């Protein structure tokens, strides 16, 4: 037994009357040289009074001793080992330690792990039913057929534009003058009963001319925001490469995040939202090349091309029709497009298809003819478009042919060729076509 005597003076007290540990004096008489060990209750109370979870390792195995079998199986991490030691000791009450020290970090860790999706999971809620796929195909075909009345003989680029509209992306039409780029955009806008605005890009166009401007209203004595033409569901950016880089940068946020920030205030754009941009590849005098960051924001880049002789003759026979797109009537609404987008998110994508897409994307990063390959944004875009393409074909699942049909228009504008490949007159479309031929397509069991 120890004989312990303690004397406290006035200087040992703080303003609140608490005894200061550093000012106490004690005299002990004992034949032993070791100090009195702290009890388990005192150790746990001290741990509970700490303000940060970092001091949790105070509860060490020598203090709260579990059975011998439990000691050998305890993990080496102090924060984890404190949990079984305290919870299995009968003499320690759970509320004093578990809430402030041990259980909170463990609960946070469990929440983080539960938020991660399991391997092989496919985004979307459930699978699309046959009725949903039928409605999707009916609306998709109605829009394509309606637009085909204005742009005849070009079903493939029309389907690609409708695919981008349903998927929530943007389209870049790059072709020679007079091929119907503007007609295609206007025909698509007239086929869907949503708002439509056209922006003619010129070198003197300012960013405020696109997104809008904040002005002072003298009648009300307040500042108000006047929306620009970008606040429409379908926006035609005609000759987008003729605007200065400063004006082109005004399109970056709205194309990626579907919102516009002006004077510190964020304004969302209406949904559905799509930018259909056009540019002339041959007339480069006085133009500004689109940066790679903006090119990557286009979901699809496609061309229209000249019509065949048969369709050209039909156009000449109807020479009195000066505005084909203006005579079209809407066959779908904005709500129909959003409903189609929901159905497309339910289309199944097997793991074999996802691996096939990643093999294509990764091949663009390692090909000797490509200097800069596709990013993950390209892989996501290809997956989204493949689901829309499958639903438009009346299927609730994606097959390799869907990926092959969309790989070039989705990925070609996202890669940069080496100088040797450009000198050899290769194009990104040629390189991607070769890559698709080298990668074997997976075999799926659709049943």
Image (spheres, rainbow, N blue to C red):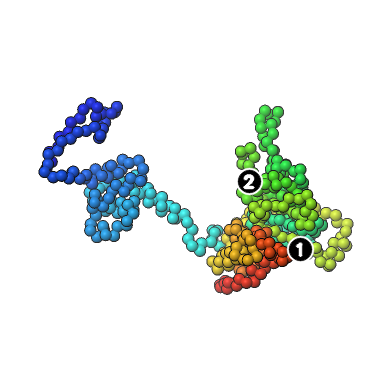
Q: Residue at x 54, y 59 (%)?
A: 123
Q: Nearer the viewer, residue 122 or 437?
A: 437
Tag on residue 259? 2
Identify which residue is drawn at 63% across, 42% down: 261
Mark 1 lies on residue: 154
> Pointer 1: residues within 10 angstroms few (<14), some, or many (20+)?
many
> 397 left or right of 245?
left
Give the residue displayed 23% in from the left and 26% down from the top: 10
Q: Quadrant of the N terminus?
A: top left
The disc placed on residue 214 is none
Say which quadrant the C terminus sits in: bottom right
- Quick one: label 1 or label 2, which is nearer the N terminus? 1
Q: Is residue 239 above or below residue 29?
A: below
Residue 89, x across and y down, in percent: 25, 52
The local crowd at label 2, few if under 14, some if 14 to 19, many if 20 or more residues have their Cα within 10 Å, is some
User: Where 435 falls versus 19 (above or below)?
Assistant: below
Query: What secondary structure is found at the residue carrying circle 1?
Result: loop
- The answer to whether the residue labelled 1 contacts the one labelled 2, judged by CB atoms less than 8 Å apart, is no
From the top left corner, tell me how far across and down residue 21 is, in percent. Answer: 25, 35
């Amino acid at each position: 037994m120890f004989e312990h005597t303690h004397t406290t003076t006035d200087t040992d007290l703080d303003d609140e009357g608490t005894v200061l540990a550093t000012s106490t004096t004690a005299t002990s008489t004992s034949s032993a040289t070791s100090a009195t060990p702290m009890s388990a209750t005192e150790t746990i109370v001290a741990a509970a009074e700490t303000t940060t979870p970092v001091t949790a390792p105070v509860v060490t195995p020598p203090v709260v001793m579990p059975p011998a079998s439990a000691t050998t199986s305890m993990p080496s991490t102090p924060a984890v080992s404190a949990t079984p030691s305290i919870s299995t000791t009968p003499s320690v009450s759970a509320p004093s330690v578990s809430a402030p020290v041990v259980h909170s970090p463990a609960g946070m860790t469990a929440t983080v792990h539960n938020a991660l999706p399991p391997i092989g999971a496919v985004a979307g809620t459930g699978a699309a039913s046959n009725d949903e796929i039928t409605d999707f195909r009916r609306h998709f075909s109605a829009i394509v057929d309606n637009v085909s009345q204005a742009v005849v003989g070009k079903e493939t680029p029309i389907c690609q534009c409708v695919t981008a509209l349903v998927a929530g992306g943007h389209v870049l039409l790059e072709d020679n003058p007079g091929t119907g780029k503007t007609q295609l955009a206007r025909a698509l806008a007239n086929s869907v009963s949503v708002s439509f605005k056209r922006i003619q890009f010129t070198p003197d166009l300012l960013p405020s001319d696109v997104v809008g401007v904040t002005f002072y209203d003298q009648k009300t004595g307040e500042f108000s925001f006047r929306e620009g033409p970008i606040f429409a569901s379908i926006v035609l950016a005609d000759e987008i490469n003729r605007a200065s880089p400063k004006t082109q940068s005004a399109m970056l946020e709205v194309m990626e995040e579907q919102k516009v920030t002006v004077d510190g205030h964020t304004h969302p754009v209406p949904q559905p939202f799509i930018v259909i941009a056009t540019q002339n590849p041959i007339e480069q005098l006085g133009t500004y090349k689109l940066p790679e960051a903006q090119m990557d924001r286009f979901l699809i880049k496609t061309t229209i091309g000249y019509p065949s002789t048969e369709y050209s003759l039909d156009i000449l026979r109807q020479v009195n029709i000066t505005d084909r797109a203006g005579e079209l009537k809407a066959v779908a609404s904005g709500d129909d497009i959003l409903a189609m987008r929901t159905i497309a998110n339910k289309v199944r994508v097997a793991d074999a298809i996802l691996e096939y897409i990643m093999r294509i994307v990764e091949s663009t990063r390692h090909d000797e003819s490509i200097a800069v390959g596709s990013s993950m944004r390209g892989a996501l875009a290809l997956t989204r478009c493949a689901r829309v393409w499958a639903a438009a074909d009346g299927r609730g699942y994606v097959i390799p042919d869907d990926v092959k049909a969309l790989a070039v228009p989705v990925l070609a504008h996202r890669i940069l060729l080496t100088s040797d490949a450009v000198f050899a007159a290769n194009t990104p479309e040629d390189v991607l076509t070769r890559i698709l031929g080298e990668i074997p397509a997976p075999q799926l069991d659709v049943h």
